[in-house]
Image (tube, coloured by chain):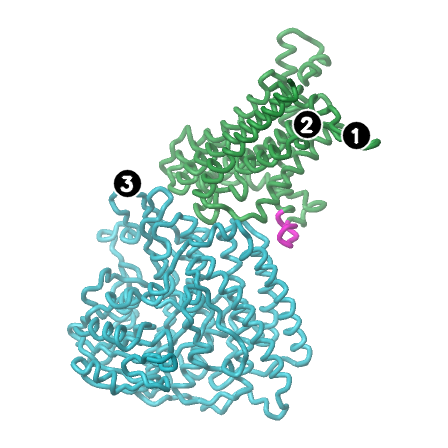
Chain colours: A green, B cyan
């Protein structure tokens, strides 16, 4: 049972109006959950994590453990002047941050978060989530091209090249999971993973696809790093080379939206991995929703870890890794998985 | 020819000295007059003969290093002095003096013989007003395009207002950011405000996609008239604080030593051994601090964002700064060296200071292995920097590269060993070189040099600890007002953090130098960026720039 249906049950009226209102309430609830996570991640967790990696303390003065910076920084960023450079391509330049932020948040519509928090469960769930995540590339190109800045332009070009090179392996690896589950429906993918793989006495290890096919899991993690643009693949905004890439000319609210989009995108990447490889919200003792949060935060930590310790590769090396390495491995993974699944089924 | 007797260049004596008569014979048709400078002899030649003389000296007499060009104006003439030396043995020096008439200060350019002459001659034109014929690109380099007059010439009026009329220059930056008209390439101004230019450097870059077709560094944004300020100050006390501000990123004592060594040789001053040991120790601390920052920011250029390496490097540098602060009372602008010695003795209690230094070097060796783990043996890092930013040794010599940049190209050139000063020749240490010629080698040379510096510091501490109490002379007797004899000229260099840091001084019998010229290693090294980055990707251009380790304060002076 999806969340809108649950909400509708509590409403005093039903019919078409009830469905719309229930859907809106449910969507707002999910968005708030995601935004709250991004708010904690952006101004606070990211700083704390990086600081821990580099022997620093980072934010500590306002609130317990510096948590007050979440509010302080929000106010600071939103109160800054919005500078519109001369010669920007207006509608596109304004739309780009919105496209980036909203496309990432749209993906969460089909993610099961446990405890019944699941907005929609279409049969093409997995394809839908990949499709929405890909819209982000469009936003990057819009931002890079409309800014009328050569650094932005280079950043936009890099973003396209990078996303092309990494989304195909990402999809192929995703499909290899579908071979196991036999369905693109998210609830089905999660359900298949709840079966027991092996039992070691009282402990039973579930058939998470990360355990069934660790190779695919690894490939997906790497491709996902490129997809969300973090080290070693943070080329579209490589600070030392092209200033800030596509986001060079953005300030104030637009800057916040771009960053919000990036963090939500990281969480979306984490949510996809959690759903198709780590059993979704499944886990012992704690409620499913908590497990879901733990999983996406662990994956967020992983991206931040890479950001702190891995050097950035060069654009030609990145393309080479994508087309010559990951794509070939992804195809190999797909064929081998298909073969094994076929033999087992027969 | 047996192995014991390598072939000697013309004018080279078997004992390593120079036979100036033989050199004069080699150049007999050109040499008008011979002068005696303190560091070497100088040949006076006609302005039109410069390329012929320099190429003869380079090809037949082995003078392959044009370390500096000094330009100055006398009452009756202009003079360009080319300071030549050899990469094999920098004690073999020769100056070529080119006088030009006051009413027509034109001299033949040396750019065809030495690429490094390009910027040196532009600077001479900019500041003094000598014009160089056949120079490929003779425009101002340190002052703005719109500047009127040549600041170091005799008739320059400092009070003259610099009016830049709007009618003539609607955009004063026009010439500096002129984009070539070509639809296939992209012109990109990197800097002067850019996260990776390490200061106010402006790179005019022409790109084909992401590949660099041409890069032209535009410098001068941080020109602070350092040479003129030194010319207006007295030898004894007033000049010493300025060197700290050339390479302001913690190589202060190395810079001070360049001035101290030049002025001491000029005025024939003794330096007590004890003071030399202290100088050596503190100079090596500065080298460590400077290299740490170089390696840290280089890692920043490769990794992006704040990385562990940068923070670790800055943490270690902080410890060196603390030791230097205990010694000199300052963290960056030390003003610790004095002509004839150092300002004061080691801090009391001495035992505690020795203990601090020792525990630092011990701990520092451990962190060095950590740097090697994170940088030199990191495969992703290697993938980024090996075989990028190639600087072949021949090119490096033509561009006058010195320091870790030259040693990263396999050129075994270190003034601490080749032209000994201070206490270096009494100590056990090695010159680090690497044959890779790429960004990786330059970083690796810096990492390994820090280890050698730690070795030197350890030995100095041992020596200082056992120094007899009644022989701790920190300064020799130096006259209160120092007036070196008139018409004495000297060029002396020390091994700074970035390379050969040289100073030319001409005395005129007063207590202030008549000409004070700084040969900054960053200035010369930066010219080679063009060779390193052509055909590379933008990230490699940035990496090459980081591996050069320039400080704009020293480039622009």
Residue drawn where x is 43% and y is 31% of the image = A142
Task: Give the mark toward the camera: 1 or 3.
Answer: 1
Q: Is residue B269 magenta?
A: no
**Does the rendering let one see residue B240?**
no
Element at badge 3? loop
Q: Which mark is residue A199?
A: 1
At x 41%, y 62%, the residue is B552
Q: To which residue does mark 2 refer?
A: A280
How far from the left and from the top, in percent, is residue A277? Answer: 65, 30
User: Are the residues at dot 1 and dot 2 in contact (C-beta closer than 8 Å)?
Assistant: no
Q: Is residue A57 magenta?
A: yes
Task: Give the quadrant of the C terminus of chain A.
Answer: top right
Distance Cα–Cα, label 1 vs label 3? 65 Å
Q: Disc 1 or disc 2, which is closer to the eye?
A: 1
* Separation (CA) of disc 1 from disc 2: 20 Å
Q: Position of residue B11 (x, y in %)?
A: 28, 83
In the picture as drawn, the residue positioned furthest to the right comes out as A202
Do marks 1 and 3 share a chain?
no
Q: Which residue is drawn at 76% across and 29% down?
A: A198
**Image spot of residue A256 (x, y percent):** 54, 37
Q: Quadrant of residue B325?
A: bottom right
Query: Which quadrant is the N terminus of chain A positioned in?
Result: top right
Where's residue B84, x and y in %? 31, 76
Q: Which of marks 1 and 2 is nearer the N terminus?
A: 1
> How far apart are the alpha carbons under marks 3 and 2?
50 Å
Q: Do discs 3 and 2 share a chain?
A: no
Q: Determine whether label 1 and label 3 are within 8 Å by CB.
A: no
Please tell me the numbered disc located at residue B184. Answer: 3
Q: Give the range drawn in magenta.
A: A50-58
Q: Is residue B30 left or right of residue B114?
A: left
Is B295 placed above or below A6 here? below
User: Residue drawn 62% across and 90% down?
Assistant: B468
């Amino acid at each position: 049972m999806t969340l809108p249906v649950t909400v509708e049950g509590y409403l005093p009226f039903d019919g078409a109006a009830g469905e719309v209102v229930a859907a809106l309430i449910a969507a707002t609830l999910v968005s708030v959950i995601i935004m709250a996570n991004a708010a904690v991640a952006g101004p606070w967790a990211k700083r704390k994590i990086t600081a821990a990696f580099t022997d620093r303390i980072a934010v500590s003065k306002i609130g317990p453990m510096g948590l007050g910076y979440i509010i302080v920084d929000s106010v600071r960023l939103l109160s800054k002047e919005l500078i519109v450079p001369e010669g920007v391509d207006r509608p596109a330049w304004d739309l780009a941050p919105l496209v980036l932020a909203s496309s990432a948040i749209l993906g969460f519509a089909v993610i099961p978060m446990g405890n019944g928090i699941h907005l929609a469960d279409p049969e093409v769930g997995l394809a839908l989530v990949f499709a929405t995540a890909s819209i982000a590339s469009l936003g990057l190109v819009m931002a890079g091209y409309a800014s009328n800045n050569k650094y932005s332009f280079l950043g936009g070009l890099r973003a396209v090249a990078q996303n092309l090179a990494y989304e195909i392996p990402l999809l192929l690896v995703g499909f290899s999971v579908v071979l196991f589950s036999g369905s693109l429906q998210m609830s089905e993918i999660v359900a298949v993973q709840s079966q027991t793989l092996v039992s070691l006495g009282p402990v039973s290890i579930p058939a998470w696809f990360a355990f069934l096919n660790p190779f695919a899991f690894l490939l997906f993690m790497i491709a996902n790093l490129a997809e969300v643009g973090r080290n070693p693949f943070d080329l579209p905004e490589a600070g030392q080379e092209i200033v800030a890439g596509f986001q060079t000319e953005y300030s104030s609210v637009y800057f916040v939206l771009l960053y919000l989009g990036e963090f939500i995108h990281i969480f979306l990447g984490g949510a996809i991995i959690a759903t198709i490889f780590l059993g979704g919200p499944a886990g012992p003792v704690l409620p499913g929703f908590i497990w879901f949060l733990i999983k996406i935060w662990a994956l967020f930590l992983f991206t931040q870890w890479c950001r702190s310790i891995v050097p950035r590769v060069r654009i030609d090396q990145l393309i080479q890794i994508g087309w010559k390495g990951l794509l070939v491995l992804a195809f190999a993974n797909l064929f081998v998985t298909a073969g094994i699944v076929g033999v087992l089924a027969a | 020819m047996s192995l014991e007797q390598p072939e000697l260049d013309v004018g080279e004596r078997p004992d390593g000295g120079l036979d100036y008569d033989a050199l004069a014979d080699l150049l007999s048709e050109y040499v008008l007059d011979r002068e005696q400078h303190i560091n070497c002899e100088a040949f006076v030649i006609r302005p039109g003969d410069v390329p012929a003389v320099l190429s003869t000296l380079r090809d037949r007499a082995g003078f392959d290093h044009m370390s500096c060009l000094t330009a100055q104006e006398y009452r009756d003439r202009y003079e360009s002095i080319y300071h030549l030396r050899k990469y094999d043995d920098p004690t073999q020096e020769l100056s070529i003096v080119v006088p030009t008439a006051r009413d027509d200060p034109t001299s033949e350019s040396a750019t065809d013989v030495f690429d490094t002459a390009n910027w040196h001659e532009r600077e001479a034109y900019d500041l003094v007003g000598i014009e160089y014929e056949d120079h490929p690109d003779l425009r101002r380099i340190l002052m703005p395009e719109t500047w009127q007059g040549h600041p170091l010439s005799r008739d320059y009026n400092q009070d003259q207002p610099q009016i830049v009329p709007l009618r003539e220059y609607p955009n004063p930056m026009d010439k500096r950011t002129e984009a070539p008209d070509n639809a296939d390439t992209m012109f990109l101004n990197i800097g002067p405000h850019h996260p990776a230019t390490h200061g106010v450097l402006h790179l005019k870059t022409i790109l084909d996609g992401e590949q660099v077709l041409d890069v032209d560094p535009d410098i001068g944004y941080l020109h602070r008239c350092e040479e003129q300020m030194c010319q207006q100050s007295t030898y004894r006390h007033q000049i010493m604080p300025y060197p700290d501000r050339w390479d302001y990123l913690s190589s202060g004592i190395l810079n001070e030593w360049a001035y101290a060594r030049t002025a001491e040789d000029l005025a024939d001053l003794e330096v007590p051994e004890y003071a030399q040991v202290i100088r050596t120790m503190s100079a090596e601390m500065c080298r460590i601090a400077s290299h740490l920052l170089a390696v840290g920011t280089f890692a920043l250029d490769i990794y992006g964002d704040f990385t562990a390496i940068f923070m670790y490097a800055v943490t270690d540098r902080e410890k060196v700064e603390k030791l230097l602060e205990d010694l000199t009372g300052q963290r960056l602008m030390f003003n610790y060296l004095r002509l004839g010695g150092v300002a004061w003795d080691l801090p009391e209690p001495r035992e505690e200071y020795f203990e601090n230094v020792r525990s630092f070097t011990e701990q520092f060796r451990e962190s060095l292995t950590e740097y090697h783990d994170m940088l030199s043996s990191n495969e992703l890092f290697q993938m980024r920097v090996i075989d990028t930013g190639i600087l072949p040794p021949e090119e490096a010599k033509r561009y006058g590269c010195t320091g870790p940049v030259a040693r990263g190209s396999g050129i075994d050139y270190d003034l601490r060993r080749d032209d000994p000063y201070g206490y270096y020749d009494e100590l056990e240490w090695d010159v680090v070189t690497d044959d890779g010629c790429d960004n990786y080698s330059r970083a690796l040379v810096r990492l390994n040099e820090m280890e050698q510096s730690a070795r030197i510091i350890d030995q100095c501490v041992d020596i200082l600890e056992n120094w007899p109490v009644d022989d701790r002379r920190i300064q020799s007797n130096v006259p209160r007002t120092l007036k070196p004899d008139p018409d004495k000229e000297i060029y002396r260099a020390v091994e700074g953090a970035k390379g050969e840091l040289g100073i030319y001084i001409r005395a005129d019998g007063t207590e202030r130098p008549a000409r004070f010229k700084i040969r900054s290693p960053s200035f010369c090294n930066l010219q080679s960026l063009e060779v390193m980055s052509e055909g590379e990707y933008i990230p490699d251009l940035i990496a090459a720039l980081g591996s050069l380790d320039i400080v704009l304060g020293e480039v622009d002076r």
